[in-house]
Image (cartoon, helix red, strand yellow):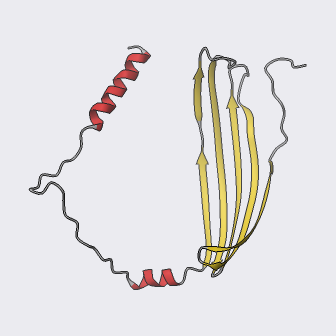
Amino acid sequence: MGIYRRKYLLIALGILFSGTGYTQQDEEPFPVLESVQWEADEEEEQSQQDDSGFRWSVLVGAAPSWTVNHNRLEIEDGHYANLGGTFQLGLGYVADPHEWFADLSLFEAFMRVPSLPGFVNSEDTWSFDTIYRYRFLPWMGLFDRVRMRAAIFSTTDVRSGQVT
């Protein structure tokens, strides 16, 4: 089965199964929704009132991609691959009307192109970002922000052929 036949088969199956769904078998065509009032328990009320304190976050991510190019203008034919990963650590402190947040993140990516024998480092950065906010109204205030960004490792320029 050719690549185009598989592609059209997948499109047809997607259209076929996207039309099926759940239908309600009631006398009324649409359900009538009544007004609902939620009762908050004491813990939720306490957490909404006391929203101050430390907060932290950890983010780990991956960004792989694979591309095949054929007969495109000024792009070498072949397979391209990109593998990337990120790690981010965040810490913050909130005490009305003051807020402070800081993030440290690392990003590393490797790329493979047809003209090179293996993967090469395409991006590596670390960044530190901190922000302090003072809110004199819930929707308005002043802030101060500092950001630093740099490469992690020394880099080299890798080319497939000699360059003059």
The percent position of residue 147, horizontal first and vertical second, equals 77, 59
Q: Quadrant of the C terminus?
A: top right
Check the image and report above or below for 29 versus 134: above
The percent position of residue 45, horizontal first and vertical second, equals 44, 83
- In-image side of 149 versus 105 (left or right): right
The percent position of residue 144, horizontal first and vertical second, equals 76, 69
Query: Which image quadrant is residue 9 in?
Result: top left
Farthest residue, direction right: 164
Query: Which image quadrant is residue 82 in?
Result: top right
- In-image side of 57 versus 40 (left or right): right
- In-image side of 96 versus 145 (left or right): left
User: Residue at coordinates 43% horizontally, 80% vertically from top-left?
Assistant: 44
User: Residue at coordinates 71% horizontally, 51% vertically from top-left?
Assistant: 106
Number of numbered discs overlaid on the protein picture: 0
Q: Quadrant of the N terminus?
A: top left
The percent position of residue 57, horizontal first and vertical second, equals 60, 64
User: Residue at coordinates 26% horizontally, 37% vertically from top-left?
Assistant: 19
User: Residue at coordinates 64% horizontally, 37% vertically from top-left?
Assistant: 83
Residue sitting nearer the eye, 58 or 42:
42
Query: Which image quadrant is residue 39 in?
Result: bottom left
